[in-house]
Amino acid sequence: MSLRRLVSDLGRMCLQTASQSMEIQQNRAIHASIRAADSIRDAHRQGTRIGTGQVETMEGTTGAGIQTAVNTSSIDARLPTAETLKQQFDGVAYHELPLVYIRASKNNTLVTVMDNKNEVITSTSCRLEGFKNARKKTTIAGQTTGVAAGQRLVRRGIRTVRVQVKGLGPGRMTCVKGLTVAGVHVVSISDHTPLCELGPRPRKIRRI
């Protein structure tokens, strides 16, 4: 008799715990996650979301599609004149300063330093500084190339230079920043990037 009562009490306890667990499961909230992409191609088509945080950009071509108002009333004061060529910078005339040519292509950044007699003092590039393949077309590679060229100039006793930039590559402005980091005083920066105004010649008219 006691064994039968014990079994019935045990069954009643099991039923109570089962009902309590079902109530807990019914009250539990269900959270659905975003459907994952089926493949890498789908993920590429969806794209990535960029946060609204402020990111420091070192590219020379950033903001090319944004039109901003520019005040051109004092633009003549920024352009060099005949007196600028006679101006002294660290005891050297402007036209006698060494000229740093920066060729910022899409895949590389070339730096060549020449004196006022058009004789090459030193030259370097991202590839010569140890960057290979896709690493050459980065802003870090351009800055490292500028630092290396600046250190070579400092070892030769050259502290003041002019800079001429050509191209729209990623190392366009970071290379100039690398020169200043190495301790070289940049007097002027001139842009000699060729821009086609009329574009290529149109195709001939098709005759049928």
Image (spheres, helix red, strand yellow):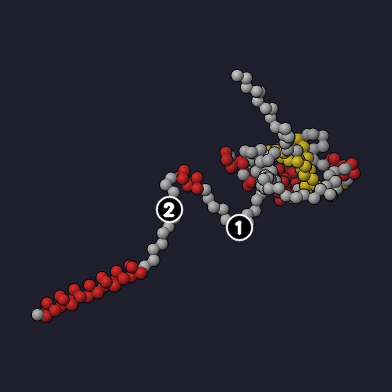
Q: Residue furthest front?
A: 208
Q: Residue furthest bottom?
A: 2
Specify whether 94 is left or right of 60: right
Q: Give the x, y percent position of residue 86.
A: 89, 43
Task: Give the camera-side residue of 110 and 84.
Answer: 84
Q: Amino acid at mark 2?
A: Arg
Residue at 65% of width from left, 23% of height from top?
205
Mark 2 or 1: in front is: 2
* Quadrant occupied by the N terminus: bottom left
Q: Which residue is label 1 attached to?
A: 53
What numbered label is drawn on residue 35? Answer: 2
Task: Give the camera-side residue of 67 and 10.
Answer: 67
Q: Give the x, y percent position of residue 2.
A: 11, 80
Q: Report how far apart the C-alphas of labels 2 and 1 lie in the structure.
A: 26 Å
Mark 2 vs 1, N-terminal side: 2
Residue at 33% of width from left, 68% of height from top?
26
